[in-house]
Amino acid sequence: MKHYSVLKNEAIEGLALKEDGIYVDATLGYAGDASSILKSLKGGYLFAFDKDNEALKYSDDVLKKIGSNYTLIHSDFVNMASYLENYHIKGVDGILFDLGVSSPQLDEDRGFSFMRDEILDMRMDKSNKVTARRIVNEWSKDDLINIFFQYGEEKLSKEIASKIACEREKKEIVTTSQLVEVIKSAVGANYFFKNHPERNIFQAIRIAVNDELASLEKILPIAIDLLNKKGRLVVITFHSLEDRIVKKVFKKYSEVDPILKGLPEIPLDYQPKIKIINKKVILPSKRELEENSRSKSAKLRIVERI
């Protein structure tokens, strides 16, 4: 199974790995990053999380050829702290979030891609009861407008949601190609081929199915608190909504509240928890962009616990 980890070298370097450190791969996927982390650990340990059982099974086969000092956990990363507590882990030396959908997931018959005719699904965790098909056919028009606008940043969200609501009354929208045709008819061929709104709509539905943004916003402060002193948090995002959340959280925890700046002594609880390692966001190299077109929207940010 071919999988390409975007910004892999930069991410691993950003973790500043210690041989005896404890690390977390919050988004295991198909073990691209986890393999590199595990190879660097001698006496250290890796915990890795993923909602996708197939990814966990595949990764276990890959990682056990490298070493045995790892534990794979079938869970959303939002539950990270409670799972680590079960293993009596109160602090870690690095955490990696690679938030993109992995290449095998895009290439499997899960309805992530608008470029192939597949059943609308988009679940990373197959036990999840919310599917893309359910959202498209059962959610109210207003809810669709909301997610298309918020998660897809699509300016014709209202027109597309209205057309979906109309078409699903005639016939259930079951496949990706059906949905693409509905989107095209809602916006017209000229706008469709010029702006490709299907990208935005599919992104919005995927985010809604997997509750991605809410989970990210919730876990980042928790991840910062889990870091040992000088521990690193590395995050790779793939669209502006994710990156905006990461940037906002990192800014909040790396600065003193403006209200307290005039005090002669800042209380410990209100001092910055992290420092930003890369002031300028790290982007894929020209070579990586040529090798993997899916990397073009990737951005990497690194912080270190003070």
Image: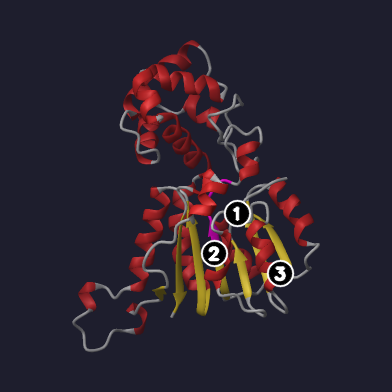
Residue 143, given in percent of the width and then of the height, sits at 39, 32
Label 3 environment density (alpha carbons within 10 Å; few <14, some 14–19, many ≥20)? few
Report the quarter where the C terminus lies. bottom left
Label 2: which secondary element: helix
Using residue 230 as the reference point, say whether residue 46 is left or right of it.
right
- Asked whether, in this view, residue 75 is left or right of residue 168, the answer is right
Label 3 sits on residue: 39
| Residue 208 % position (x, y) | 47, 40
Residue 216 percent location from the top left of the image: 47, 55
Question: Picture quarter containing residue 282?
Answer: bottom left
Residue positioned 37% across, 30% down in the render = 195
Residue situated in front as seen by the camera: 181 or 134? 181
Instruction: Judge whether 187 appears above or below 20 on screen.
Output: above
Local SS, label 1: loop
CB under 8 Å between callouts 2 and 3?
Answer: no
Q: Residue at x 36, y 80 (%)?
A: 269
**Marks 2/3: CA distance?**
15 Å
Q: Is residue 125 visible?
A: no
* Residue 250 in sight here: yes
Q: Mark 2: few, some, or many residues within 10 Å (few <14, many ≥20)?
A: many
User: Which three-letter amino acid code belongs to the residue tagged 1?
Assistant: Ser
Q: Of label 2 and label 1, which has the lower sequence position? A: 1
* Side of 232 relative to 239 (left or right): right
Residue position marked by numbered label 1 in the rendering: 5
Q: Which mark is residue 11?
A: 2
Q: Is residue 46 above or below residue 58?
A: below
Q: How is the image coloured?
A: secondary structure
